[in-house]
Image (cartoon, grey):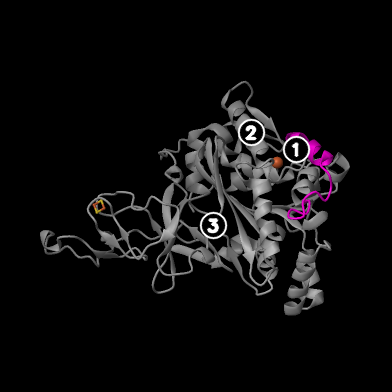
Amino acid sequence: MNQIMGEPQGVDFPISAEEIRGLVQPNHVHRRAYSDPAIFALEQERIFGRLWIYVAHESQLKNPGDFIRTRLSKFEVLVTRHHDGNIYVLHNRCPHRGARLCMVDQGSNRAFSCPYHAWVFRPDGSLASVPHPKSYPADFDIADRRNHMQRIANVQSYRGFVFANLSDNPPPLIEHLGPMTDVIDNLIDRAPDGEVEMSESSFALEYRGNWKLHMENAADIFHPTFVHSSSVMPARRAPANASILDQDQTREMLMANGFGFKEWEGIQLKGLDSGHTYMTAFYDSGVLSRQSEDPVSIEYRRRLAEKIGEERAAQVIGMNRFNNIIYPNLIINAQYQQMRIAIPLSVDRTLVRIQCFRLKGAPDGIFHRAVRFISNLGSPASMIFSDDVEMLERCQSGLKTDTGPWIDFSRGLDSDDKGADGSVSGAASEMPMRVQFNAWVRHMTTEAA
Ligand code: FES
Ligand SMILES: [Fe+2]
């Protein structure tokens, strides 16, 4: 799989701060924000090259030699667990002649051996050996860092979620996450044994559209009624209790997209100054609900209460926030143990990874629900996400044409509530897009990190 390499990036930024500011109005955004390769290159520099970007979960790197291949800004990187127990983020590039070293997305390697001339690197990036060492000059030193895979200096974890940052002197990760640590805490608190493990199986799909379209879609509460209608009607007609295994999870998830305006208006949205957003949940009935009385849910609640007490367990399960977006590109749904990452490849290509977690100590049935959740909602064959992807690609194709420079995100502008802490609350609103673009303008117009 070569897709995470993306396409060559421009390095010239002939765009002034004034020009960037001119692309975003209170209620409109210019199509260039989605379609101009120079804007994309600047985003790689000033957003993905400066903010803390999620790269891996520690449970994917249990043993020395385990690694993940992903992308950080315009670079392909390997996230590795070294024999010293530490996690490193390394450029996936051989320092000898520049060849890409690793071509798989995940695995375990005692060492990375370059396919070209067989220089061998340890999981911390240091050079272990070169073939035929006597042919190198006397001053060639395998301990010289110039001969090592280059490391990303800033790597920090929050409770197992590993982020990397390319800037020189970044603020602590915890500062970037701000109140969004609540959702990571909540995901882990849901595990009776206090630990989560990422499932080895995951989905990845690529769409032909800008990365921001996906982040906006994940916070857009009015579209499901229209975009997902083709699966709402059959779900409504399907008999209830038809599948013992599924316990109507699929049917109820599909039907939830058929809410009327009144129900959508009842979903609260929250936007933070940092660009992070979330909404109150809408899968709140049936087997996925907090109150579900099926045997798996009862057993799960019993096990959790046994570990942390009835009252605390009720609080943990009661946290009901959907599509928690950690700006710029991570989405976490704690109550369904699910996560999505949008990895920009080029101005009009985005890779989405969809993954789920096992709650340690919970009954297997809870994990099966999480797997069913990502299959229903996020797989390439999903009856939900495939609709969204069609819309994202149609938007991209429309935004390529210059038939009109501005697109609208004014819904809810007059009814949003502004908090003293800089947060904004709204319902039936496109506020999350406005909040995301406020952060976008701030980062894109900051010259130096
Ligand atoms: S390019 Fe890697 S060993 Fe030569
Ligand atoms: Fe959708």
- Quarter of the view holding residue 232: top right
Q: From the viewer's perspective, tell me whether residue 22 is left or right of residue 250.
A: left
- Nearest the viewer among 287 and 164 is 287
Foreground label between 2 and 3: 2
Residue beneath disc 2: 390
Q: Is residue 182 left or right of residue 239?
A: left
Q: Nearer the viewer, residue 79 or 108?
A: 108
Which residue occupies 59% across, 27% down? 397
Task: Please provide the residue range marked out in magenta.
Answer: 223-248
**Position of residue 325 in the picture relative to residue 75 (left or right):** right
Q: Earlier in the sequence, mark 2 or mark 1?
A: 1
2 and 1 marks in contact (CB < 8 Å): no
Front position in the image: 41 or 312: 312
Residue under the image location 67 percent in, 65 percent down: 364
Q: Residue furthest right?
A: 262
Label 3 is placed on what type of residue? Tyr
Amino acid type at image mark 1 = Ser
- x%, y% of residue 392? 63, 35
Q: Nearer the viewer, mark 2 or mark 1?
A: 1
| Residue 35 pos. (x, y %) | 55, 32
Whether the magenta-drawn stretch holds residue 194 is answered as no
Q: In the picture, which quadrant includes the N terminus?
A: top left
* Point 72% across, 53% down: residue: 278
Residue 269 drawn at (x, y percent): 77, 50
Q: Residue furthest top?
A: 403
Residue holding disc 3: 54
Mark 3 neighbour density, 10 Å: few (under 14) some (14–19) many (20 or more): many
Let me know if residue 15 appears in the view. Answer: no
- Gap between marks 2 and 1 measured at Cα: 15 Å
On residue 415, the disc is none
